[in-house]
Amino acid sequence: MKNVALITGASGGIGRELAKIHAATGGDLILVARRGDELEKLKHELESAHGVQVVCIPADLTEFGSVDHVYEKCREAVSTIDILINNAGFGGHGKFHERDWDRESSMIRLNVMALSELTHLIVPSMIKAGHGKILNVGSTAGFLPGPLQAVYYATKAYVNSFSQALAEELEETGVTVTVLCPGPVDTGFSDQADLEGVQAFKSAADPQTVARIGYRGMQQGKLVVFDSWKFAFLLSWIVPLLPRKMVLVISRKSMEKS
Ligand SMILES: NC(=O)c1ccc[n+]([C@@H]2O[C@H](COP(=O)([O-])OP(=O)(O)OC[C@H]3O[C@@H](n4cnc5c(N)ncnc54)[C@H](OP(=O)(O)O)[C@@H]3O)[C@@H](O)[C@H]2O)c1
């Protein structure tokens, strides 16, 4: 296999679109998600459209040992992973103390633990090869606290911070790290996270555009990539200057259901 991209959460949404973009460049793929049937459908679509090789690894990345399992399966299939895209993730709406703890802890295991563990397993071989690209899917949610999605926003703050720190550590190794920070995107995410009626999701971006922007940013070795200049401007230049309480109120209102 050549120019191999490992993509988690490739069975739908942004991950599926990233897989399509990579296949269109002639690159091979390893696809990970729970829904093996969706991965198999995508495999057949991409292999017949682009003549690439696709390996599917069905896995629930919240389960203990699952990341090791995925890594072992990758090692059986390929000698090098050229691109790692940590995209799998989910959110959840509601007050922290009223939400189901199993759901919250699974979110931390997927959005934070699995992403970090997979990166920790794969980076050494990228350094040894002298090249590699990592794209972590963070979020605009990672730039501020998120009342009514407290854990989700905190997991994305971790992804945003971790990715930038890692990028700096890997300077001069040939390995780049990019964090993609989308605003609301029209995928299965909002149903999973019970976000129906949340104002911000009424004007969500399409996943094809977001994936294209993220993939291009990763290829260019950019550090932080937004899918909209408005979010980039507000979160980088305005929000940090506002009083904390004001940020919390605005953030909470943006998550309230109408
Ligand atoms: N949509 C948005 O508004 C938005 C905004 C900013 C950031 N993001 C981030 O973008 C990323 C992709 O989300 P999306 O919008 O494309 O949502 P999506 O359509 O719900 O896709 C999520 C992907 O993650 C996989 N996944 C979920 N739980 C998993 C688990 N336990 N183990 C393995 N794979 C799992 C899903 O596949 P299976 O169900 O088959 O496992 C699916 O392929 C996430 O990290 C999300 O936080 C989304």
Image: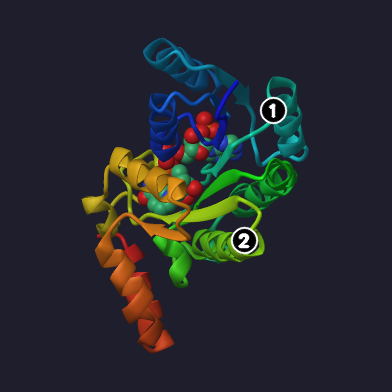
Question: Is the residue 82 above or below the residue 216 in the image?
Answer: above
Residue that lies at the very extreme toward the bottom in this rendered image: 243
Q: Position of residue 41 (x, y in %)?
A: 45, 15
- Quarter of the rendering occupied by the N terminus: top right
Q: What amino acid type should be assigned to the residue bearing mark 1? A: Cys
Residue located at (56% from left, 53% from top): 176
Question: Would residue 245 appear left or right of 2 to someone viewing this image?
Answer: left
- Which sits in the foreground, 3 or 43? 3
Q: Considering the numbered disc 1 on the image, is that residue within a helix, a strand or a loop?
A: helix
Which residue is the site of mark 2?
171
Question: Is the residue 49 above or below the residue 235 in the image?
Answer: above
- Work out how far the residue at label 1 is from the one at label 2, CA to CA, in angstroms: 26 Å
**Residue 71 lies in quadrant:** top right
Question: Would residue 108 appear left or right of 23 to someone viewing this image?
Answer: right
Q: Position of residue 164 (x, y in %)?
A: 56, 64
| Disc 1 within 8 angstroms of ligand 1 (CB) | no
Instruction: Give the colour scheme shown.
Output: rainbow
- Quarter of the rendering occupied by the C terminus: bottom left
Residue located at (45% from left, 69% from top): 143
Which residue is the site of mark 1?
74
Residue located at (72% from left, 49% from top): 120
Q: What amino acid type should be assigned to the residue bearing mark 2? A: Glu
**Front position among marks 1 and 2:** 2
Residue that lies at the very extreme toward the left in this rendered image: 203
Q: Residues within 10 Å of mark 2 (few under 14, many from 20)?
A: few
